[in-house]
Amino acid sequence: MNKFENYRNQKEFQIPKTMKAVTLNGVGFENLKVSEVPVPQPGPNQLLCRVDAAGVCTSILKIISQGSKHTYINGWDLEKFPVILGDEGSVTVAAVGDNLKNQYKPGQRFAVQPAVDVAPICHRERYANNAAGMSKCAVGYTLGGNLAEYILIQEEVLQGQCLLPLPDDSMSYFGVSMAEPISCIYSAQDRQYHIFKDGPFSPRVPKLGLLPGGTAVVIGAGAMGRIHFEMAMRYRPKNLIISDLVQERMDHALKTNAEKAKKLGINLFAINGKDLNEELMKITNGAGADDIILAVGVQPVQQNALGLLGKGGVANFFGGLPKGKNMLQIDAIAIHYNEIKVAGSSGGDPYDMKSTLDAIYNKDVDPGNYVAGVGSLKHAPQVLKMIEETKVDGKVILYPGTDIDDLRFVDHWDQTKEIEFLENNLR
């Protein structure tokens, strides 16, 4: 395994003048390209990192369709200043700016949290109104992205503490890149809360997370819904239900989690969405659900879910609704007498990312269950088209240091397969 070992243990980098990167220079797929661009030179307060693995995120489609009108692009002229896409990645430091040499060394590995809660520092003049009113920016939007051979880690990322060390440098590259989407799920489940009382004269104590010993329902068995299903087991509900209209997706969720659920004493159920109301009431003896996670952005489904909550139940709107179809009705009596609650989230922060990296390292979640394909940077446009046309059910991981002819589809991915893939395909 000489090629892989040399790659993993590299401490001195011969950085080329140019690199391949997935760039966007306008609205629409016609402006999405895999380009040869100059490798960025890090300033005194910046880092240059090698990208070892990058996930292809659904959110990129919104950037492609909205261009400069996207909130995080905010008037940036994409034709004049194309951006490098990719908000999910595992990186290794390749070059360190002069002012950071006491803090970082080539060869160190990190994960990148893309949502940066810092106002733009670099190139403010490129944003609308000189970035007035902006309080955050994002990697893979106007900050350099992971769908490239190298990524420039700018001041915003470092100031926002969005470059996260790993629990262990032996972690798989793909697992680290998967930490970002999984951290969104960690964040969502951490926003559920339930009220506990030890007795009539005890104070009410709120606790974050799903209800231990309760009934949790995940509606939507796409890749993110299935990750929700696995992550929910950390709270040890008595009953854990996944609901969808596609049996194959639900079967995948049951198959990959059956052994873990048995060890934890959790009852798993897969219920067709058409039968959910009736079957849920059978399972709970009419009590309803304690936690419902809506991992699907369908208005009638979200509306129906509110009626499935039991006393003190919480519905989490993880799947967003499009504008114009985003209004729901809520039963005020259910709020008043049953004390139901709603929660929502649209992403994670550095704490969520760190916690997720720990969860992956501790095997609380297996990111390999959700990898549907692997490839090289040149496959990015193909993958994004497939995501747009719902022809891929899972995450596709691209390895910028490789060059393979065809995208490879997989049922499961792990570190052994990753090492073999890199050994055979690193340039």
Image (tube, rainbow, N blue to C red):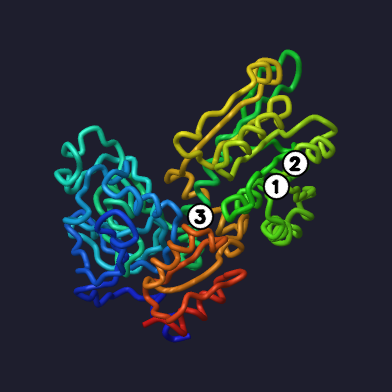
Q: The C terminus lies in which quarter of the figure?
A: bottom left
Of the residues tagged 3 and 2, which is closer to the observer? 2
Label 3, label 2: how many angstroms apart (C-alpha)?
Answer: 33 Å
The residue type indicated by label 1 comes to Ser
Q: Quadrant of residue 37?
A: bottom left
Q: Could you say whether the residue bearing mark 1 is in a helix, strand or loop?
A: strand
Q: Could you say whether the residue bearing mark 2 is in a helix, strand or loop?
A: helix
The residue type indicated by label 2 comes to Leu
Residue underneath mark 1: 243
Residue at (60, 41) in percent of width and height? 294
Residue at (34, 60) in percent of width and height? 29
Confirm or deny contact between disc 3 and disc 2 (CB under 8 A): no
Residue underneath mark 3: 357
In depth, the one of 252 and 114 nearer the eye is: 252
Residue underneath mark 2: 276
The residue type indicated by label 3 comes to Leu
Q: Which label's residue is closer to the chain start, 1 or 2?
A: 1
Residue 296 place in picture, x, y as percent: 58, 45
Residue at (69, 25) in percent of width and height? 312
